[in-house]
């Protein structure tokens, strides 16, 4: 699916669609996550994604689900959570200025660019503007067999 790419940025939507078993994108996200789990690439995920993922369970007073997501992401094979640091904020500002991404998207992209991502899985076509990232839109992906 990602060929030569060894470090792949995963947008929050990959996890949301996977956890929800999304009827249109669930199979593609399962394929991506399974490939990562099998070590075909290292997935890079901004810690901002953790915040985005636990909002819904917290709104539903499901601290157990929020805690489960955090634990899963902390321990998931071949997944690297990238912190939001001052360097990331400075890179996010540059990404936002250069590519006109919205602030949340710049904060999702910046830590993974600094972490060496060369590809990304997302459903946000605006990310195609980011130089140096081979963007794979979920809507264009078809699950691979055996993944």
Image (cartoon, rainbow, N blue to C red):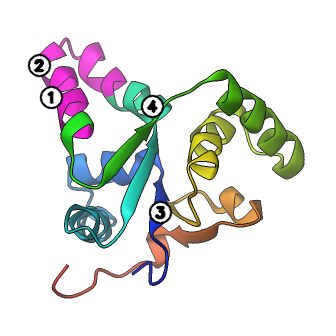
Marks 3 and 2, how far apart in space?
A: 30 Å
Marks 4 and 2, how far apart in space?
A: 19 Å
Query: Between disc 1 and disc 4, whose residue precedes?
Result: 4
Marks 2 and 1, how far apart in space?
A: 6 Å
Q: Are marks 2 and 1 in contact (CB under 8 Å)?
A: yes
Give x and y (percent) for residue 129: 77, 62
Give x and y (percent) for residue 38: 19, 68
Q: Secondary structure at mark 1?
A: helix
Foreground label between 1 and 4: 4
* In magenta stretch: residue 21: no
Q: Secondary structure at mark 4?
A: helix
Residue tagged 4: 47
Please give the label number shown on residue 7: 3
Give the dominant element type of the magenta stretch: helix, strand or loop. Answer: helix
Q: Secondary structure at mark 3?
A: strand
Marks 4 and 3, how far apart in space?
A: 16 Å
Query: Between disc 4 and disc 2, whose residue precedes?
Result: 4
Foreground label between 3 and 2: 3
Q: Residues within 10 Å of mark 1 (few under 14, many from 20)?
A: few
Residue sticking out furthest to the bottom: 145
Image quarter of residue 1:
bottom left
Residue tagged 2: 64
Marks 1 and 3, how far apart in space?
A: 25 Å
Marks 1 and 4, how far apart in space?
A: 15 Å
Residue tagged 1: 68
């Amino acid at each position: 699916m990602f060929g030569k790419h060894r470090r792949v940025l995963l947008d929050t939507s990959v996890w949301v669609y996977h956890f929800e078993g999304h009827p249109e994108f669930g199979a593609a996200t399962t394929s991506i996550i399974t490939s990562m789990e099998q070590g075909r690439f290292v997935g890079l995920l901004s810690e901002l994604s953790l915040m985005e993922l636990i909002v819904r369970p917290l709104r539903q007073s499901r601290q157990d689900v929020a805690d489960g997501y955090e634990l899963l992401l902390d321990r998931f094979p071949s997944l690297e959570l990238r912190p939001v640091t001052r360097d990331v904020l400075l890179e996010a500002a540059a990404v936002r200025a250069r590519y006109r991404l919205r602030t949340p998207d710049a904060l999702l992209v910046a830590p993974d660019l600094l972490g060496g991502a060369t590809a990304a899985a997302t459903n946000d076509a605006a990310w195609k503007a980011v130089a140096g990232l081979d963007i794979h839109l979920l809507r264009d992906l078809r699950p691979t067999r055996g993944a």
